[in-house]
Image (tube, grey):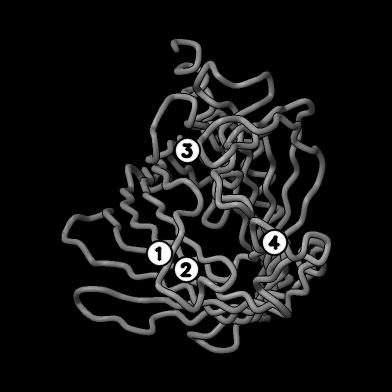
Amino acid sequence: MKSNFFFFLIFLLPSIALSQTTTASMLSAQSLMQKWTQHRNLYFNYGLTYLTKGLGDGHQDGGTYNRFKTGQDYKGDNTDYHASYQLYHAFSLGYRVGTKLSLSYSYTFQEDLNKNIKYDVYNSDGSVFATNERPTGLSYNNQRLNAFISNVFNNQIFYMHINTFTEFPTTETSKNQNMYYGFGIEPSLGIYTTVPGLFTGFNISAQRNIYDDQEFQADWCKPDCMYNTRYQTLLVSISPYLNYMLTDKVTLNSSLSFDWDQQGDQVYTREFNHNMDNVLELGLTYYLLQKFSLGSALQAALDEPSVDKTAIKMNMFLSI
C-alpha cells in the first residue's frame, strides 16, 4: 500500500512542477485564441480525463476500476468493473446568444489503452458464467446539442443553472438499436455559504431515450426467450458536491455520485434499477491560467467499498 500511496501523491498535483516557460507558452497560446474570439460569441471547451492506476492488488497490469463498466446486463445481472486504463475526451463548441443563454454542440469519446484485461460475466446467483477480455482502442458516444441557461433562479440562499440537451443516435450501437433520439435536463443548484471560498450544491441529470421498440423478444429466440431485449430508456443521477479554495489557484474538490436507470418498459412503471456504482471523489484542481486547469482525484465506490474498487483520475480542462 505504501507504493500506491506515494503514486497518488506524485500525481495529485502534477501541474505545480510545471516551469515558468511552460506557463508563459500557455498564456501566449491562450492570448492568440482570445484575440480571435474577443469580438465574437463563440467559445470552445476541451476536457481530458485519464483513468489510471487502481489502488488494490486485485488488478492486472494496466487494469483498474472503471465505474462506467458497472451496472446490469440484459439479464439484469451485475457487470464487472475491471477494465483498462482509459483516456476520455470531451469537446464542445458553443455560441452565446445572450447574457444567459448559450447553445453548443458536444462530442465525447474514450480510448481503452491496454490489452489482455480480463473481466467476468456473472450468473444471477453471482457465480461466474464466463471470462472475457476487454476490447482496446476508441469507442464513441452519441453527440448532443445543448441549450444552457444561467441564473434561472438567484436569491440570497441559492442559485440555479439549467442545461437541456437533445442526443442523436450517432454511434453504431444506437443505430443498431433503432434509437430515434434522447432528450434530457441537467439542473445545477448552488447554495450560498457564509464561509469565503466554500462552494456547495447539487448537480442533477435526467435523460429519456426514445427507440423504435424499447423492449421486445428477438426473432431468433421466439417463443422461448427467457429474457426480453430491453434498452436503457431512462437515466437519472444526483451528485452533491463540496469544494473549497485553498488558495487563489488550488481548489479542494469533493463529490458523491448516485445513479439509477430504467430499462425497456420499466419506464412506464415506478421500478428503478441501481445502475452504475455510486462513488465518492476527492481531489485537487490547480489553475495555471484562468481557463486552463490540471488536477487529480481519487475515486472510490460506495457500493461494497474495497481498495480494489478505488482508482486515480487525472484531469485537464481548457476553455477558449
Q: Residue at x 78, y 74 (%)?
A: 178
Q: Residue at x 36, y 76 (%)?
A: 160
Q: Which residue is labeled 2 in the image?
A: 205
Labels 2, 4: front one: 2
Using the rendered view, name the quadrant where residue 151 is placed: bottom left
Q: Residue at x 48, y 85 (%)?
A: 100
- Amino acid type at image mark 4: Phe
Residue 308: image location, x then y, percent: 49, 25
Tell me if label 1 and label 2 are in contact, CB under 8 Å: yes
Q: Which residue is labeled 4 in the image?
A: 91
Q: Mark 1 and mark 2: span between their CA atoms?
A: 7 Å
Going from N to C along the chain, the mark reached first, 3 or 4, is: 4
Task: Provide the secondary structure element on which disc 4 rests.
Answer: strand
Q: Which residue is labeled 1 in the image?
A: 203
Is the C terminus in the top left, top right, bottom left or bottom right quadrant? bottom right
Q: Residues within 10 Å of mark 3 (few under 14, many from 20)?
A: many
Task: Provide the secondary structure element on which disc 3 rests.
Answer: strand
Q: Mark 1 and mark 3: span between their CA atoms?
A: 18 Å
